[in-house]
Image: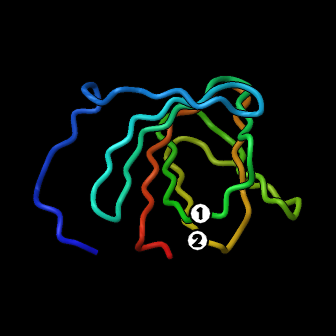
Amino acid sequence: MSKIPFQTIDWDRIVKTEHPGETGTSFWQTLELENLRIRIVEYSAGYLADHWCRKGHIVHCLEGDFISEFENGGKVSLSAGMTYVVSNELSSHRSFSEKGVKLLIVDGKFLE
């Protein structure tokens, strides 16, 4: 992992991109650094991811709540103030939010 100099992130200046789910929509504000991606992600009410994800993430719930479903049938519910961590290729997961949620997501090469 490379060294990252001190910097601030003004999320109000980072453009939101739209990503449709199987149902609902997610909106991403993304900062890309070398081997590191930091995002604020918002899921609309009724959002269900359109794929099973095998990538590693650190996901911190800022507002609202959501369910992380696992392809093997398990589920974990997270609400504001809760975090999950998983490395690449250690689970197939997808997110669902009934009422909408705002997340801080960090991922990158360090999770391989």
Looking at the image, which residue is at 70% across and 34% down?
97
How many neighbours does mark 1 have within 10 angstroms: few (below 14), some (14-19), or many (20 or more)? some
Mark 2 Cα shell of 10 Å, populated few (<14), some (14-19), many (≥20): some
Which tag, 2 or 1, sits closer to the chain's start?
1
x then y, percent, for residue 71? 83, 60
Could you tell me the amino acid type at mark 1?
Answer: Lys
Residue 38 x, y percent position in the rendering: 37, 50
Residue 60 in the image, given as x and y percentages of width and height: 49, 50
Q: From the viewer's perspective, is residue 4 above or below residue 9?
A: below
Callout 2 touching callout 1 (CB < 8 Å): yes
Residue of label 1: 55
Please state, as top left, top right, bottom left or bottom right, where the N terminus lies in the image: bottom left
Horizontal side of 93 relative to 26 (left or right) equals right
Looking at the image, which residue sits at the far right? 73
Q: Is residue 53 above or below residue 49?
A: below
Single out the residue that lies furthest toward the left. Answer: 6
> Which residue is identified by label 2?
88
Question: Which residue shows up at 56% across the image and 60% down it?
Answer: 84
- Of residues 89 and 100, the one nearer the viewer is 89
Residue 90 placement (x, y as % from top left): 67, 74
Which quadrant of the figure has residue 2? bottom left
Q: Residue at x 30, y 30 (%)?
A: 14
Q: CA distance from mark 2 to mark 1?
A: 4 Å
The label shown at residue 83 is: none
As helix, strand or loop, the secondary structure at mark 2 comes to loop
